Amino acid sequence: MEIRKDLEEVSPYIARLLSFSKEFSDNNKDWGHLKNQEDFKFIHKVPDNDRHKVEALYCGGRDMAIYMASTLAEVNYDFTRFPTLTSIVEGFNESWVNGNYDPEVPDTAIETCKTHDVNLWSVNQMYHLFKRQEKLLSAIRGTLNILKNSDLYKLENGIEIMSKDQTTINVSGNSSSSININSDNATASVSQTYNEPDIFNEIISEIKSADLDDVTKQELIDNTQALAVSHESGTFSEAYKDFMQNVSAHITVFTPFLAGLSALL
């Protein structure tokens, strides 16, 4: 994958955004399959006055997939929309990435079906697909935060670039394989074949209980979510290096979990 020349300095993170674009593109196919080729056609069993609450799960989830797939891809070629790194970092401020949607939609859809005793496999799978996309959004926020702290971003915005002590983190091991949950067969792609290690949720719980301001907590959570996504996609070793650098200022929060994270390498 060739990254545009003016962004070569931050090419690993632009490549990550482009990988997220592909994930959303594959998800878009799954949304279509679940709506048109599974039991979603029986949504008429939900009364008219509440049916929109279930339909909102499909509409919102697929709109998210379509928008994020196309917009993330554009960062690498649309110089009109994204002429600089700054425009990329700030271009998602009012988008799905920063919560410009109703996060209650998935739970509301499930509860509505339960209320009317309607059990649709497609709706349950849409719920999980929506939740997976939310994790991708969190990982994107973390990546954009990394880009915002890059020297290139600072140079574009006239921010002084301070010299840093160089720290080398040696990481051994490598993810042996990647679990592909986005195959053409949508039934396989949306089934929950990947079991996320409990350590990621444990870290997030620890962050939430830590004595930190809300902004710092959200940044640390986003970095943790990005690490969790990398474990599922098979790029954990590379992402672990970024993670350790990004959370170094608050390493005491993560100290109890370092051995567990290292075991995943």
Image: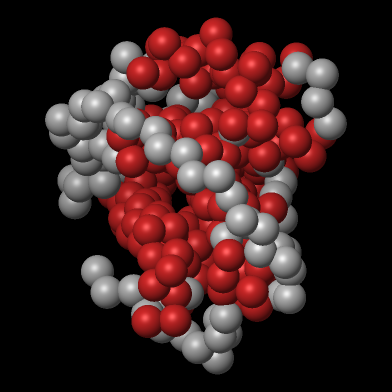
Camera sees residue 180: yes
Q: Picture coordinates of residue 170 (x, y %)?
A: 33, 31
Of all residues, the one furthest to the bottom in this rendering is 80
Q: In which quarter of the image is residue 189?
A: top left
Task: Tell me which residue sits at (61%, 23%) in the image.
Answer: 251
Q: In this view, does 104 lie above or below 264?
A: below
Residue 28 x, y percent position in the rendering:
38, 57
Q: Name the spot of residue 5 as percent of width and height, x first.
A: 37, 82
Residue 85 versus residue 265 in the image, above or below: below
Which quadrant of the structure image shows residue 232? top left
Q: Which residue is drawn at 41% across and 11% down?
A: 260
Q: Position of residue 172 (x, y in %)?
A: 24, 27
Left or right relative to 136: residue 109: right
Along the line of sight, which residue is nearer the eye, 233 or 240? 240
Quadrant location of the C terminus in the rendered image: top left
**Name of the residue lying farthest toward the left:** 176
Quarter of the image with the N terminus in it: bottom left
Q: Is residue 54 left or right of residue 185?
A: right
**Could you tell me if residue 96 is visible in this image?**
no
Of 180 and 143, which appears nearest the observer? 143
User: What residue lies at 57% left-to-right and 39% top-to-bottom?
Assistant: 246
Q: Quadrant of residue 129?
A: top left
Which residue lies at the image location 15% right of the left edge and 30% below the top edge? 176
